Amino acid sequence: MKKWLLLLSFFTSFLIAEDARMIIQKLEENLRGKDVYAKMEIIVKTKRHTRTMLIESWGKGKKKNFTKILAPSRDQGITFLNLDRQMWQYVPKIERIIKIPASMMLQSWMGTDITNDDMVKQSSLVDDYHVSILQKEGPIVTLELIPKRGAAVVWGKIISKVDTRTYTQIEDVFYDDDGVAVRAIEYRGVKQYGTHYVTTTMSIIPFDPAKKGNSTTIKIRDIRFDQGISESYFSKNALIRYSR
């Protein structure tokens, strides 16, 4: 009897783990597609000022992403390439390509609450994290993501709340290696684009007391999936070519 109970417990745990992995896999497929182009407005609020940026982004699969800043004018033409977990930046004013080292992945991107790691977007949640279900409330599922040993990730833990009707996020909370909550991302305004569902507004809120009141809001202005993006965006030559 005990043997059967142990087997039942094992298979139940296995099915729950597979259910959690399926949710994350569908979430990633919904976000990425085969390729994706997006134009985004980024609004950065601090105690001293509010500023707005406009960027374009081209992505293909898990390992290729190219970003260009359109506004403000002082930053116009700055480009970023993320390729195979590596990141480069081109600054037109100094005509120089700069490689961003792995040690700077948690640093702020362009003075926002976005990190360099967010821009790289190379981590695959399915590949790099052990996923388990913490809670289910109808279609809303809360997941815990713990990094796999040796995974090249910057967070110690992520708690993610997902709507399984659309496989979109509602909220993510990111923790450091000591288990301290560092920031939250809140997602709003789900819209359907073809077969994909997208949250059109994302607000990043840091928990650092020194940054109380700060936030970075990303608004999707245009997004297109599976259009067949050219490979020409995903080489270091593209940093200068598409900067103009």
Image (cartoon, rainbow, N blue to C red):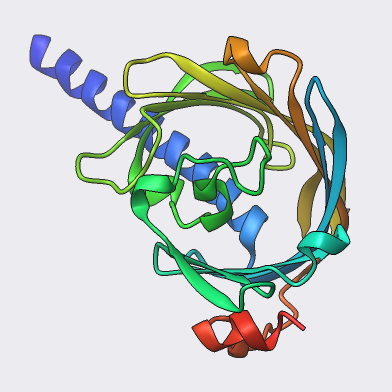
Query: Which residue is at 48% across, 68% downward?
Result: 98
Q: Residue at x 22, y 25 (%)?
A: 10
Q: Nearer the viewer, residue 214 or 179?
A: 214
Horizontal relation, residue 227 to residue 234: left or right: right
From what the image shows, is residue 113 above or below residue 177? below
* Residue at left offset 68%, top offset 83%: 229
Task: Name the foreground residue: 133 vs 106.
Answer: 106
Is residue 194 at all visible to an observer of this figure?
no
Rendering quarter of residue 84: bottom left
Q: Is residue 91 above or below residue 125?
A: below
Instruction: Locate the C terminus by quadrant.
Output: bottom right
What residue is at 71 percent from the left and 83 percent from the top? 242
Of 45 and 131, nearer the camera is 45
Give the x, y percent position of residue 104: 42, 47
Q: Quadrant of the N terminus?
A: top left
Q: Position of residue 71 (x, y in %)?
A: 86, 60
Image quadrant of residue 140?
top right
Task: Please determine whether, in this image, residue 112 is positioned above or below residue 198.
Answer: above
